[in-house]
Image (cartoon, rainbow, N blue to C red):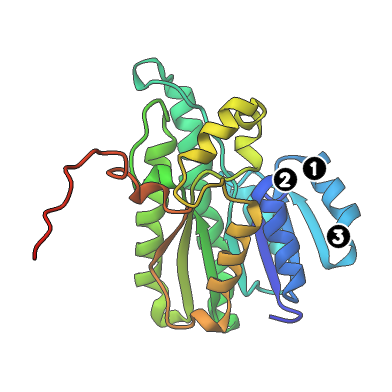
């Protein structure tokens, strides 16, 4: 939406930075929020005057309120992308790590969305897109608190959509699968692991950050004006492939 503001959290790198670039390409002015000051500075150098930045811990209500107050006007789009992981088995997971992941991924989504939607409603409404994960669609071994946090984001998205639909605010989520960016950079640095992960995806490749950004911008557009409360899985068919490797007998043939 030309000239309107978008807020993108976790925008300093990975999927978030690509969402920010894509939003600018769609005509938004973008406020990029992240705890990574260095990454934000680099992004600002690349994207120029269409971007403003703020160092924000999304789980900190006061910090979010301060950054929101600095915006020149209410945003029309909010993308809750900020997230952290602390992978490992539940039996070994510390309460501190559980709290950190839930605090950023779930509480942060709540705090940012509510703070900005309170400004969006009197300004005519807008769109919120929360970044969930396939880990929140189906459980994964050794995912720590990440699975619970992202499942919570999906349900929170539905609740926000229902409560804010008559206030002019649509809320949807995007659940990325194996995306070759951001959090996956470390694991994909091993060529053998990269190949095996890619082979597990029915379409034959891992996703790109742009695949996620394209869906986010679609959900923010007027083409999705009748879509709210949905979680769109962007995973190349990964979570639907559970039975694809199960051997079966040859089908009966008639005639």
- The quarter of the picture where the C terminus appears is bottom left
Q: Are marks 2 and 1 in contact (CB under 8 Å)?
A: yes
Q: How many marks?
A: 3
Q: Which residue is mark 3?
A: 47
Quadrant assignment, res 115: bottom right
Left or right: where 71 falls relative to 106: right
Which element is circle 1 on? helix
Q: Which residue is mark 1?
A: 39
In the rendering, at what x and y percent does residue 32 appear? Answer: 73, 56
Query: Can the viewer see residue 70 in this picture?
Result: no
Residue at 34%, 51% in the rendered image: 240
Left or right: where 158 falls relative to 247: right
Nearer the camera: disc 2 or disc 1: 2
In the rendering, at what x and y percent does residue 241 appear? Answer: 35, 47
Residue at 60%, 58% in the rendered image: 211
Which element is circle 3 on? helix
- The quarter of the picture where the N terminus appears is bottom right
**Could you give the CA–CA distance between mark 3 and mark 1, rounded to whole angstroms?**
12 Å
Which label is found at residue 250? none
Q: Is residue 80 above or below residue 50?
A: above
Q: Which residue is mark 2?
A: 13
Left or right: where 31 falls relative to 238: right
Q: Earlier in the sequence, mark 2 or mark 1?
A: 2
**Could you give the CA–CA distance between mark 2 and mark 1, rounded to whole angstroms?**
7 Å
Which element is circle 2 on? loop
């Amino acid at each position: 939406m030309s000239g309107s503001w978008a807020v993108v959290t976790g925008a300093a790198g990975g999927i978030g930075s690509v969402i920010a670039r894509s939003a600018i390409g769609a005509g938004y002015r973008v406020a990029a929020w992240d705890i990574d000051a260095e990454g934000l500075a680099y992004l600002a150098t690349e994207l120029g005057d269409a971007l403003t930045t703020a160092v924000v811990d999304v789980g900190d209500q006061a910090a979010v309120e301060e950054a929101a107050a600095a915006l020149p006007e209410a945003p029309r789009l909010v993308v809750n992308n900020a997230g952290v992981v602390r992978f490992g088995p539940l039996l070994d997971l510390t309460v501190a790590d559980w709290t950190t992941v839930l605090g950023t991924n779930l509480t942060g989504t709540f705090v940012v969305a509510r703070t900005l939607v309170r400004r969006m409603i009197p300004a005519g409404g807008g769109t919120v897109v929360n970044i969930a994960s396939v880990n929140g669609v189906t459980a994964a071994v050794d995912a720590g608190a990440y699975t619970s946090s992202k499942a919570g984001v999906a349900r929170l998205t539905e609740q926000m959509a229902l409560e804010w639909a008559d206030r002019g605010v649509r809320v949807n989520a995007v659940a990325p699968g194996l995306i070759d960016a951001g959090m996956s950079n470390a694991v994909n640095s091993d060529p053998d692991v990269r190949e095996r992960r890619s082979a597990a995806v029915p379409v034959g490749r891992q996703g790109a950050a742009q695949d996620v950004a394209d869906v986010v911008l679609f959900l923010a557009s007027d083409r999705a004006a009748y879509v709210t409360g949905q979680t769109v899985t962007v995973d190349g068919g990964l979570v639907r492939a559970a039975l694809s490797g199960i051997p079966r007998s040859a089908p009966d043939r008639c005639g």
